[in-house]
Amino acid sequence: MGLTWKEEHLDFVLVPSGLLIMLGYHLLHLHRCINRAESTVIGYENYNRRAWVTRILQLEPKDRGQAITVIGGNISAATSFASVSLTLSSLIGAWIGNAYHNESISTRIYGNTSPTIIYLKYVSLLSCFMIAFACFVQAARSLVHANFLISMPNCEMPVSNVESAVIRGSNFWVIGLRSLYFATNLLLWIFGPIPMFVASVITVVLLHFLDQNSSPLPQYDPPPVVCYGAASDKEMTAVVNGIPEESQEIRNGKLSMKRI
């Protein structure tokens, strides 16, 4: 007897294919980020973050309030995404567990609706949301650490320490977002393997255009030297000549008396 095709076999073909497409694209993108970072949006943003950290640390600690506000906004965003990921991981799990008890839903899905596949859908979806939750929490932790380093008074903080904290937080943020992309595709697997595979292809095509960077890296000029409480021309001339201002005034007064 020959092998007969059944709709249950579609899950074993389209779902691994969709996951391999997503995983293969992200591995290629990781290779580009490591070897040609300037051609990716992630590398472009990290380059600007390093320049931002360098400029911020050139200010006095009391003048770094704007930087603390910027990092605080990123911390709030990471915390919000972490809460959303944790909430969805519990709600969707309960919804999946109850949805397939309804025969009207099971009969409308073109694919495998066996208990093993249902359990696999639940575990894979829950894993993606938990990974996203962990990454967003680590992003918030790194940014909080960077906030402490930037606001530390009476200390010459090395730029590399703050840079590593900010870049680490942004990298965890990116991984958390990518985990949500995977979770979205796995969520569509609930409605069958065909929507999941189509969503994977569309996601890869969109990310291919969104992750590319065609803009050249900006070359930031060195910051100007700002003299707070600038002296007058007479004081500057005295400093350049190495003569105090009072000595010059006395000398000018003596010359005037001699002329009289």
Image (cartoon, rainbow, N blue to C red):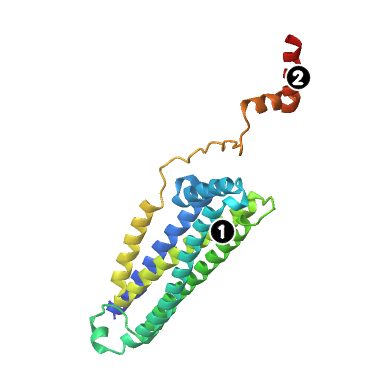
Q: Which quadrant does the C terminus fall into?
A: top right
Nearest the viewer among 198 and 147 is 147
Q: Considering the numbered disc 2 on the image, is that residue within a helix, a strand or a loop?
A: helix
Quadrant of residue 1 within the rendered picture: bottom left
Residue located beneath label 1 in the image = 168
Label 2 crowd (10 A; few <14 / some 14-19 / many >=20): few
Residue at image location 40% in from the left, 77% down from the top: 88
- Contact between marks 1 and 2 (CB within 8 A): the answer is no
Residue 60 lies left or right of residue 177; in this view the side is: right
Residue located beneath label 2 in the image = 251
Q: Considering the numbered disc 1 on the image, is that residue within a helix, a strand or a loop?
A: helix
Residue 167 lies left or right of residue 158; in this view the side is: left
Residue type highlighted by circle 1 = Arg
| Image coordinates for residue 41, horizontal then vertical, percent | 44, 50
Nearest the viewer among 136 and 209 is 136
| Image coordinates for residue 237, horizontal then vertical, percent | 67, 24
Label 1 crowd (10 A; few <14 / some 14-19 / many >=20): some
Residue at image location 50% in from the left, 67% down from the top: 136
Q: How far apart are marks 1 and 2 (CA)?
A: 61 Å
Q: Residue furthest front?
A: 260
| Image coordinates for residue 254, horizontal then vertical, percent | 76, 17
